[in-house]
Image (cartoon, helix red, strand yellow):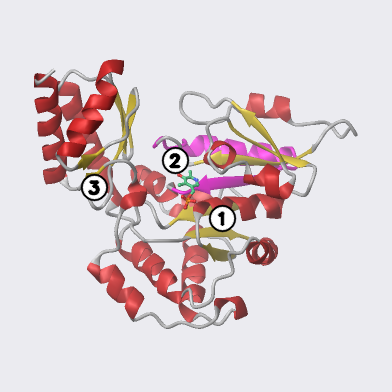
Amino acid sequence: MIDLRSDTVTRPSPAMLSAMVSARTGDDVYGDDPTVNALEAEAARLSGKAAALFLPTGTQANLVALLTHCERGEEYIVGQQAHNYKYEAGGAAVLGSIQPQPIEAAEDGTLPLAKVAACIKPDDIHFARTRLLSLENTIGGKVLPVDYLAEAYRFTREHQLALHIDGARIFNAAVALELELSALSRYCDTLTICLSKGLGAPVGSLLCGDEAYIQRARRWRKMTGGGMRQAGILAAAGLYALENNVMRLQEDHDNARWLAEQLGTLGLTVTQHTNMVFAQLPAEQVAPLKAWMQAHNILIPAAPVTRLVTHLDVDRAALTQVINQWRAFLAAQ
Ligand SMILES: *Cc1c(COP(=O)(O)O)cnc(C)c1O
């Protein structure tokens, strides 16, 4: 199967599996797992933050991040299309009594700071207390400009807000900009990173921040059921991913660009950012195209704007097959 539905579909490689099998482990709830400790130290080092916390999923990492930043009756300002507003089942509101204040993002994925400013509530008993600005990088594959990150960081200092980055795909941003992670993460208080997307680990996310913050986050992780025991077998995959699968993200971006160009030559309207390609389909082609592809062992979502995501389990030869099948499908219409 050639699976372009997401970069979450990657499988651990033999080398990653062998790192997992030979991992040293201990009980991480006691702080005794050397491999988890090594992964957390490496995430702290790469992000330039004092500490990091290993969590099972990105959703839980964002939830724990929000629970640690905001108390009951407080709010975070967030994009209308942001994962930690729209795609996490309302967890912050349901489990944290934290109010989201969503705003529409600009075309480039940034949240315009004038709009953010207009949403900050005055200190008045009518209002929730505004605590946090949450940005997502990359968002829909788009890389937030570094100048914007710097400006947003300054803005949050002026307004006594914390700044959180949902950086599930932040390494895609860093690689696209040819910058170290720390050149981006210096402009936030806290940052989440997914190991289970383009980095190819089967499980795992990291939350990075200062010591006191991560200490409090550790309690929220325990409370939300994320305290894992011999998690070193999972952390070993994460360490392997950070060591081996970051720089190769450029290949995914190059493959996505190539795929977008090829779809363009088939007459489709296509946009592409980092490892994501968005192809517009006529309504009547949506379901038949998906079925055609599936019959040829290619998995794509069915939508009028179909999102195709490149990752380490699809190479140029696989994408050539996709283009050949797409051409065959169009010819058969
Ligand atoms: C995938 C994703 C998450 C959630 O990660 P899971 O591990 O699937 O829970 C959070 N934020 C963003 C931006 C994501 O793309």
Q: Is residue 131 left or right of residue 87?
A: right
Instruction: Return the x and y of residue 166 as percentages of the image width and height.
Output: 53, 46
- The residue wearing badge 3 is 251
Q: Residues within 10 Å of mark 2 (few under 14, many from 20)?
A: many
Marking on residue 61? 1
Instruction: Return the x and y of residue 75 as percentages of the image width and height.
Output: 73, 39
- Tag nearer the camera, 1 or 3: 1
Residue visible at 54% across and 36% down in the picture: 82
Q: Quadrant of residue 134?
A: top right
Choose the circle earlier in sequence order: 1 or 3. Answer: 1
- The residue wearing badge 2 is 138
Instruction: Return the x and y of residue 87 as percentages of the image width and height.
Output: 53, 40
The three-letter amino acid code for the residue at tag 1 is Ala
Whether the residue carrying mark 1 lies under 8 Å from ligand 1 is answered with: yes
Q: Are marks 3 and 2 in contact (CB under 8 Å)?
A: no
The three-letter amino acid code for the residue at tag 2 is Thr
Vertical order, 20 against 187 (above or below): below
| 262 vs 297, nearest the viewer | 297
| 35 vs 202, nearest the viewer | 202
The outermost residue toward the right is 125
